Amino acid sequence: MTILRVPYHLDEYLPDLRPPLPEEAVTVTADLPDGHVWTRMAALHEVVAEHVADHVRAGRVPTVLSGDCMVALGTAAGLQRAGTDASVVWFDAHGDVQTMETSASGYAGGIPLRVLTGYRPDPATDRLGLRDVPEERVLLVDGRDLDPPEAEYLRTSAVRVSAVADVAADALVEGPLLLHVDLDVIDPDQVPGTLFPAPGSPSADAVVGAVRRVMDTGRVAALSVGCTWRSDPEDDLPGRARARLLADLLAPPSR
């Protein structure tokens, strides 16, 4: 497994976002142009896509850790560039299926799963060359904290939904998988400093168990992890909860 650390939240560089990772982890940064947030994010995601594609072509499984979920767009584009047509398993407390037209807050980080299924908020995303992932090949796991437009979209779309406890290998779409885990899917009492805590969260053990069931299929082509917590490393002291959680998530598959 190759670990890529992408220390950004949207287009903001976060020098203090230092998830506790093995020393061989590679830090990915980009010279972002001045201008609109979408143009800047597209430049970052382009660099991520190239890194991911290079590793996939070399027969490795990249793990991409970042400060948001949007970087998963670069991971998906990298898989596609390397010839991997992956379905998506998306663990998140939130739906991430807003559009910029329906979002009450206008927060760009609330749309990445919708982008993967075909929504395009700005021509700047075109540079990634993303191909749509058919809705029926997307599984949203947990997704309990939904705005009304998200709930309506999921009610009428072919996107599949699951509780964490119900994730099983035989329920996954066949073929390669892009596995994304936003760590706010876990009980915020067990993940210090979560930016967007959501009530009713499953435990870390339950989420790690479900993630391991997906990883153990041997079909995960890339793993994307959203470290959506405050970047101050002091938030993880004492107890080193984040370090223990990442170690459990990034352990090699059991087969």
Image (spheres, rainbow, N blue to C red):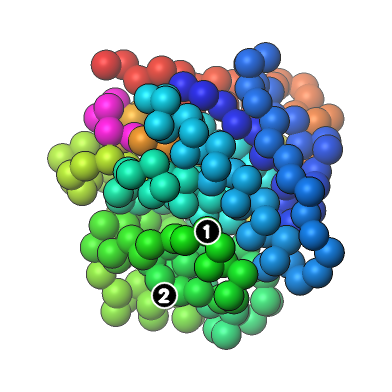
Q: Residue sitting at 47 percent across and 61 percent down?
A: 129
Q: Name the residue under label 2.
A: 151
Q: Residue sitting at 63 percent across and 16 percent down?
A: 24
219 in the magenta segment: yes
Judging depth in this view, the residue of 39 and 238 nearest the camera is 39
Which stretch did the figure color magenta?
A: 216-220
Tell me residue 155's x, y (percent): 31, 76
Three-letter amino acid code at the position of disc 2: Ala
The residue tagged with tag 2: helix, strand or loop?
helix
Q: Would residue 249 appear left or right of 168 to someone viewing this image? A: right
User: In this view of the protein, can residue 228 be seen by the observer?
Assistant: no
Instruction: Please tell me in which quadrant of the rendered image residue 218 appears.
Output: top left
Q: Residue sitting at 79 percent across and 48 percent down?
A: 31
Judging depth in this view, the residue of 175 and 110 nearest the camera is 175
Three-letter amino acid code at the position of disc 1: Leu
Residue at the bottom extreme? Answer: 101
Q: Residue sitting at 27 percent across and 33 percent down?
A: 219
Q: Earlier in the sequence, mark 2 or mark 1?
A: 1
Tell me residue 184's x, y (percent): 58, 47
Mark 2 and mark 1: span between their CA atoms? 28 Å
Tell me residue 182's x, y (percent): 54, 46
Q: Mark 1 points at which residue?
A: 128
